[in-house]
Image (cartoon, grey):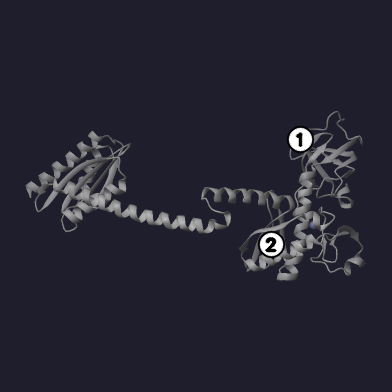
Amino acid sequence: MTERLYYADPYLRRFEAAVTERLSWRGQPAVVLSRSAFYPTGGGQPHDTGWLQGVPVLDVVEREADKAVVHLLEAALPGAPAEAGGEVVIGEVDWPRRFDHMQQHTGQHILSQVAERLLDATTVGFHLGETASTVDLDRAFLNDEQLDQLEEEANRIVFENRPVVARFVSRDELAGLPLRKPPEVSGPIRIVEIQDFDWSPCGGTHVQAAGEVGLIKVVRAERRGSETRVEFLCGGRALADYRVKNRLLLSLASRLSVGYWELDEAIERREEEAQRQRKAAQVAQDQLLAAEARSIAAQAEPLGEFALVSRVLQDRELEDVKRLAVRMAEQHGCVALLGLAGDKGHLVFAAPPDSAYDLRPLLRQACAVIGGGGGGRPHLAQGGGPSGELASLQKALDVASRVIRCKEGGD
Ligand SMILES: [Zn+2]
């Protein structure tokens, strides 16, 4: 079993150790050492990284069978024999990463104890992530005020800078401690105590005084069934988050020419203004469309008791063309055969609602001219085809017009 140096001194970054085993782990060269300051993934805390004889340590895991700490390396150790001969190597832990984990992990102990005392909420899960960490509390409803209390009280413990001590305790002593949760391992139990506040069985790495955790910021909470997942940031992560959000807020405020505290109102005013403009634009567009429908309808040719209009449009929205056709049919008694030229060709046929026309066969016939098809309802049919040139669409409408005139003349 590897002697775990971080148990006694989580601040140890450089150490010497003998190589006791060389192996391949998940296809990667790996070593087991007589002792190690590298933390292997476990207990919700990710592994350390760093270097062994200058070779990057990519991952650190605990071997189930014998609890040995296995260091996965980017490459085999240089100049070493194939068989482990107990040669001595120098290990170096990536300190910024480790210290970040210590801040987040100790912050979690504090948050979990405060949640227990203040909110009667027990921590049932902990995840220390790449960018944010979470605790799962066994309470479904936590309002903003309760989350504020949680944050406030946790930071009070930080500001008091209470000592944090980790040590192995005897079974007798263990029985007398007010543990937040029961130990999950057999054998010697390591207790992490935040002085006179929290006692937790834990094998992770922690700071030596609560003040080193830095700010504890609860960033969001999300209900998950009967639990609440609380996301939080400690220390350096909270600072980085504050920096990003502060910059973002100042940049948004400057773009809207207001103070950041006025952003909410400024955005609301903008939304109202945008809505007014959308409405005004809609009214203007309706008026334009009505005028256009009148103007086209004035040039319609008689078709029995109705009138026939055939026209190819371009540079328009298909939705507008549709509204135009419907308007001409409903308001001006027109059978409207409209085409829309573009990358593809579109056809929209509309007939007065009180007429007996079924435009669908006619539309299919016209669509065939531009190489496509379509369908719809008897009084409003729509389709298209790949040929979107003006001339092709004109030809398609001519075919449809001829058919409809013949039919009307023959009736
Ligand atoms: Zn811990």
How far across and how far down the image is residue 289, in percent?
Answer: 25, 50
Quarter occupied by residue 124: bottom right
Quadrant for residue 145, please give it: bottom right
Q: Is residue 130 left or right of residue 319?
A: right
Left or right, residue 107 beside residue 390: right
394, above or below 165, in the image: above
Extreme residue in the top direction: 79
The local secondary structure at tag 2 comes to: strand
Q: Looking at the image, can residue 199 be seen?
A: yes
**Contact check, label 2 and label 1, Cβ < 8 Å:** no
- Asked whether, in this view, residue 224 is left or right of residue 193, the answer is left
Q: Position of residue 306 (x, y in %)?
A: 12, 52
Instruction: Please state which of residues 75 and 312 is positioned toward the viewer in this rendering.
Output: 312
Dot 1: element: loop
**Number of the label disc, if any, that sits on residue 136:** 2
Q: Which mark is residue 190?
A: none
Q: Position of residue 392 (x, y in %)?
A: 24, 35
10 Å neighbourhood of mark 2: few (<14), some, or many (≥20)? many
| Label 2 vs label 1, nearer the camera | 2
Residue 248 lies left or right of residue 269; in this view the side is right
Residue 4 in sight: no
In front here: 14 or 190? 14
What amino acid is labelled 2 in the image?
Asp
Report, in whole angstroms, how far the alpha carbon at label 2 lies from the one at label 1: 35 Å
The circle on residue 74 is 1
Q: Amino acid at mark 1?
A: Glu
The residue drawn where x is 73% and y is 56% is 215
